[in-house]
């Protein structure tokens, strides 16, 4: 299979894997949000702040190091396996002991037991990292998609049943544990790789030598992503954190799905292309334009339909989340661009630049937090958008050193798409003024106008990204859907 075919297949299944996971979680989250309130989601958000940071230590960057290494041995796999388990147990112990302090920090006694139970995720996750790394190395996301579907759906059903029977925030916690456990068990039972009693100090040094810089960057990035939840939970309220968490869920469903799918595929692809700068730059430019086109469409549709989506699917009690969705949606457009530029640094083996960048960018959160605590939530949320924009500029400046593709060139490449999408958003917003009081009708009108405009301009102006996506969709239709239709007709 050629590199192009592997990339397209990998993107298809990686995107499907993330889409399956996030759509199921999103759908189940909507049901749970109908049953529970913002406060319950806020309490879970508080508990996950420290769990998320600890999970970064458990991974320790070894997964990325294993994916990047050209020839992995049994010693490499087993060393990573036992190292991650050891780190998982150590992280669990530390979080377990710190649960009392965390509970007092947020002035919430419910967090004492909740944090300790949620810390079990650290141990569970550590058992499945080698299998995940192996599948990612092989750009094999089809198996991960099936595993994700089973784990997400079954754990979601358990969470809904528990919520209906009055378990409150515990239904969210148990759902998370079950999903993690089911995923790891399915990875283990379906994997051809089996752990052996083998450990290599030399292998650890090699993998950790590269991974430790990614670990530092990962810890900084995770702290950055969760510090806002910490600040909201500490200085505002559990309900306010619930609104913010729900807003990020809406934004991350499309943007993170595209980001993670792109990251998982482009990292091994770009790493395998090291040495051919002209070809690398050409592929990279196409990835930048295509990812921005896809993400921009989805995020702007979310922004213009935020009111209708929240009120229709969550109900009036979640209305305070609407402005957060609209603002965070702007930063959501930037997520894949941030990831692609960071992937270029990793693919070129420059984890040192990766770490340095993360340190520079995260220093910027300090004034945002100070201003947010002083002037309120909206200032804090706008600060997140500002930091995302600055982060993109810094990332692209550093990646430009490796392939001579500057920030200015990237912005020029995406400028036509940006203009097209802004016109689309303006037309759709204006069309929605026809019947704003009818939520479902307004949603349908705005979405139809937006997609119709994209289709017409894409066909008439022969926009490259539209043509590329149309070609991929047509190819997938001929290869997969058409044979099924023909078979059904013959039967």
Image: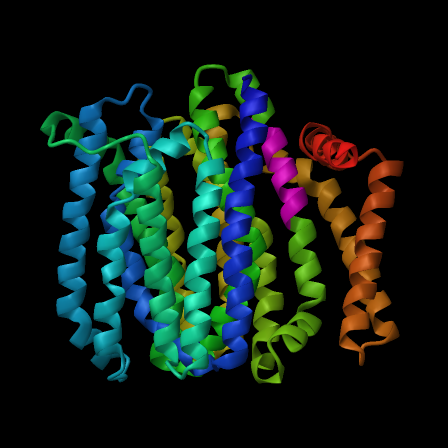
Residue drawn at 63 percent across, 67 percent down = 326
Rendered residue at 51%/48% (across/down): 18
Magenta span: chief secondary structure: helix
Q: Residue at x 49, y 53 (%)?
A: 21
Magenta region: which residues? 284-295
Residue 301 seen in this snapshot = yes
Question: Residue 109, how many percent across, how many down?
Answer: 24, 84
- Asked if residue 103 lies left or right of residue 475, the reply is left
Q: Is residue 52 above or below residue 158?
A: above
Q: Quadrant of the C terminus?
A: top right
Give the quarter of the image for residue 332.
Answer: bottom right
Viewer-nearest residue: 264 or 12: 12
Give the x, y percent position of residue 485. 75, 36
Residue 377's place in the image compared with 59, above or below, is below
Q: Position of residue 115 (x, y in %)?
A: 25, 70
Q: Is residue 168 above or below residue 160?
A: below
Q: Quadrant of residue 200?
A: top left
């Amino acid at each position: 299979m050629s590199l192009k075919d592997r990339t397209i297949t990998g993107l298809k299944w990686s995107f499907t894997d993330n889409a399956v996971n996030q759509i199921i979680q999103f759908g189940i989250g909507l049901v749970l949000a109908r049953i529970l309130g913002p406060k319950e989601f806020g309490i879970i958000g508080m508990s996950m702040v420290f769990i998320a940071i600890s999970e970064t230590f458990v991974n320790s960057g070894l997964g990325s190091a294993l994916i990047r290494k050209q020839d992995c041995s049994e010693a490499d796999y087993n060393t990573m396996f036992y190292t991650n388990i050891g780190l998982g147990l150590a992280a669990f112990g530390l979080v377990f002991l710190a649960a009392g302090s965390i509970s007092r920090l947020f002035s919430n006694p419910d967090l004492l037991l909740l944090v300790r139970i949620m810390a079990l995720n650290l141990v569970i996750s550590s058992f499945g990292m080698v299998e995940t790394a192996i599948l990612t190395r092989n750009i094999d996301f089809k198996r991960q998609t099936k595993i994700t579907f089973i784990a997400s759906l079954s754990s979601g059903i358990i969470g809904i049943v528990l919520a209906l029977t009055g378990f409150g925030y515990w239904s969210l916690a148990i759902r998370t544990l079950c999903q993690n456990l089911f995923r790891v068990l399915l990875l283990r039972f379906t994997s051809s790789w089996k752990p052996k009693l083998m450990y290599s100090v030399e292998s650890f040094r090699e993998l950790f030598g590269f991974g430790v810089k990614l670990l530092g960057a990962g810890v900084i990035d995770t702290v950055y992503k969760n510090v806002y939840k910490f600040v909201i939970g500490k200085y505002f309220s559990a309900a306010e954190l619930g609104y913010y968490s729900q807003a990020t869920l809406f934004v991350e469903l499309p943007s993170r799905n595209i980001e993670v799918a792109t990251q998982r595929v482009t990292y091994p692809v770009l790493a395998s292309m090291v040495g051919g700068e002209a070809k690398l730059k050409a592929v990279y430019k196409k990835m930048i334009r295509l990812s921005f086109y896809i993400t921009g469409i989805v995020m702007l549709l979310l922004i213009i339909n935020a009111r209708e989506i929240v009120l229709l699917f969550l109900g009036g009690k979640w209305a305070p989340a609407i402005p957060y969705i609209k603002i965070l949606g702007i930063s959501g457009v930037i997520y894949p661009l941030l990831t692609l530029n960071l992937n270029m640094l990793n693919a070129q083996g420059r984890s040192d630049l990766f770490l340095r960048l993360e340190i520079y960018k995260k220093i910027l959160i300090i004034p945002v937090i100070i201003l947010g605590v002083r002037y309120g939530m909206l200032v804090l949320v706008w600060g997140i958008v500002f930091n995302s924009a600055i982060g993109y500029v810094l990332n692209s400046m550093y990646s430009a050193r490796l392939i001579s593709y500057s920030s200015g060139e990237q912005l020029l490449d995406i400028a036509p798409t940006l203009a097209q999408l802004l016109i689309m958003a303006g037309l759709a917003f204006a069309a929605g003024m026809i019947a704003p009081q009818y939520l479902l009708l307004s949603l349908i009108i705005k979405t139809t106008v937006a997609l119709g405009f994209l289709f017409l301009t894409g066909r008439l102006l022969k926009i490259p990204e539209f043509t590329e996506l149309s070609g991929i969709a047509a190819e997938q239709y001929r290869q997969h859907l058409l044979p099924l239709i023909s078979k059904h007709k013959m039967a």
